[in-house]
Image: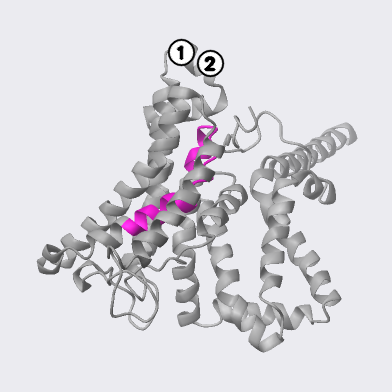
Amino acid sequence: MSAGNAGNGNGANGNGGSRLHGAIETYFRLAPVTVPIYAVLVAVVVGSLVMLLAGANPLTAYGALFDGAWGSPEVLARSLARSTPFIIAGLAVAFAFKAGLFNIGAEGQLLMGALTAAWVGTWSWMAGLPAILAVPVVLLAGVAGGLFWGGIPGVLKARTGAHEVIVTIMLNAIALRLAEWIINSRSPRILLDLSASVPHTVPIFDAARMPRLPGTALHLGFLLALLLCAAVWFVLQRSTVGFEIRTVGANPDAARYAGMSVGRTIVLVMAVSGALAGIAGAGEVSGGTTGYLTSGSFIGIGFDSIAIALLARANPFAVIPAAFLWGSLLAGAPTMQLQADVSLDIVRVVQALIILFVAADAIVRWLFRIRAPRDGDITTGEVFAKGWGT
C-alpha cells in the first residue's frame, strides 16, 4: 500500500518535474520573441536614467509619451499612420535579410518610388480616372521606381560581385540629389509647383489619393502594409521561390550545389526589396495629407527601417509591432516635449538603446538568464547580412 503510494508520489513528482522542465524549455525556445521585448524594456529603463541625468521626471515623460502616442482613438490613428511607411520599408529590409543581403538602400528606393508616384499622379489623363483605378496606377508607379533602383545593386552584385552595402549607399546619395534637382529646378522646370512658396512637386490629382479614415490621418496604406506582410510571409514560407531565397541566405554554396541560381535570386530579392520600399514612398504621397513631395520628405525612414527589421528579427509579421513601436515613439515625442519639457532627442536615445540591446542580445540574455540559441529553438532562421564585410 505504502509502496503504491510512494510510486504514485514519485509519479506525481515526475510529472511535476516534467511540466517544470517543459515550461523552462518553452521559455528558452521563445527567446527569439522574448529577447527583443526584454531589449525594449531595458532600453526604457536606461532611458529613464538618461532623463534623470537631464533633470526630467521619467514617469511624467513616459506618461506624456503615452498620451501623445495612444491617448485617444484619434491619436492612435495618427500613430498607426506614422507607422505605415515604417512597416513597409522595414518589410523591404527584412526581405533582403532573408537572402543574406544588407539593403541599406531602402532610403533611396523609397524616395525614387515616391518621386515616380508624384510624377505619374500629375499626368493629365489621371484626372479622369476613378479612384479605384488611379490609386493602383500611382502605387504601381512607386513599385516601378523602387524596383528599378533596387535592381541596380542586385545586378551589380550578381554580375560583378560589387557589395550591395557600398552600392546602395552610393545610390542613396544619387537618389537624394536627383530628387532635389527634379523638385527644386526652375530651369528647366520638371515637377516644381511654381505657385508654392516652399519648393515641392505639383500635387497629385484627388482621384489618385488613397481614402482616409474620416477625421484622422490614417489612410488605406495601413491595410496595404498588413496585406504585404502576409504576402511576403506566404512567399517566404510556402513557396518554392521563398525556399530558394532562404537557402541562398543560409548557404549560397549549398544552394548553388543544389542547382539554384544564386545570381538570379540576388537580383530578384534586391528588386523586390526595392519595390516594397517604393510602395512605402508612393503610399505616403498618395495617402499623405499633402499629396506632394518635398526634397526633405522621408528623411530617415529608410535607415530606421533597418533598425525595425533588426528588432523584428526579419520576421514579416513581427515587423508590424516593431514598426508600430517606432512610429508611436515618433508620434508621441512632440507631446512629451510640450507636457514634460523633455527634448525630442530623448526619444531618439531610447530608439538607439533599443537597437543596441537587440544587436547586443548577449547583454539581455545575461540579464534575464536566457541561454544562447541552439537547434530546436523557435526561430525564424533569419540571416542578417551574411555577406557583410566579405
Q: Residue drawn at (23%, 59%), measured in percent from left and top?
A: 120
Q: Is residue 230 above or below residue 349?
A: above
Report the number of discs. 2
173 or 309: which is nearer to us? 173
**Left or right for 340, reference 134:** right
Q: Amino acid at mark 1?
A: Ala
**Quadrant of res 251:** top right
In this rendering, does residue 223 appear at all? no
Tag 2's secondary structure? helix
Main SS category, magenta section: helix
- Residue lying furthest right in this view? 2
Residues at circles 2 and 1 in contact by the CB criterion of under 8 Å: yes
Where is the N terminus found, in terms of image quarters? top right
Percent across and percent down for residue 169 are: 54, 45
| Displayed quadrant of residue 270 | top left
Image spot of residue 154 (x, y percent): 43, 33
Q: Within 10 Å of the Cα at label 2, are there few (<14), some (14-19), or many (20+) other Cα atoms?
A: few
Number of other residues with Cα within 10 Å of mark 1, as a class: few under 14, some 14 to 19, many 20 or more: few
Q: In this rendering, is residue 208 above or below 106?
A: below
Q: Is residue 6 above or below residue 214?
A: above
Q: Is residue 252 above or below residue 231?
A: above
Instruction: Say which residue label 1 marks.
Output: 258
What residue do we see at 55% from left, 44% from top?
314
Q: Which residues are magenta?
A: 94-115
Residue at 45% over, 60% down: 85
Residue occupied by mark 2: 254
**Split into 4 quadrants, where in the image is the C terminus?**
top right
Queried whether the magenta region covers residue 245, the answer comes back as no
Residue type indicated by callout 2 = Ala
The residue lying toward the viewer, choosing from 296 and 85, is: 296
Was residue 106 drawn as part of the magenta stretch in this picture? yes
Asked whether the viewer can see residue 12, the reply is: yes
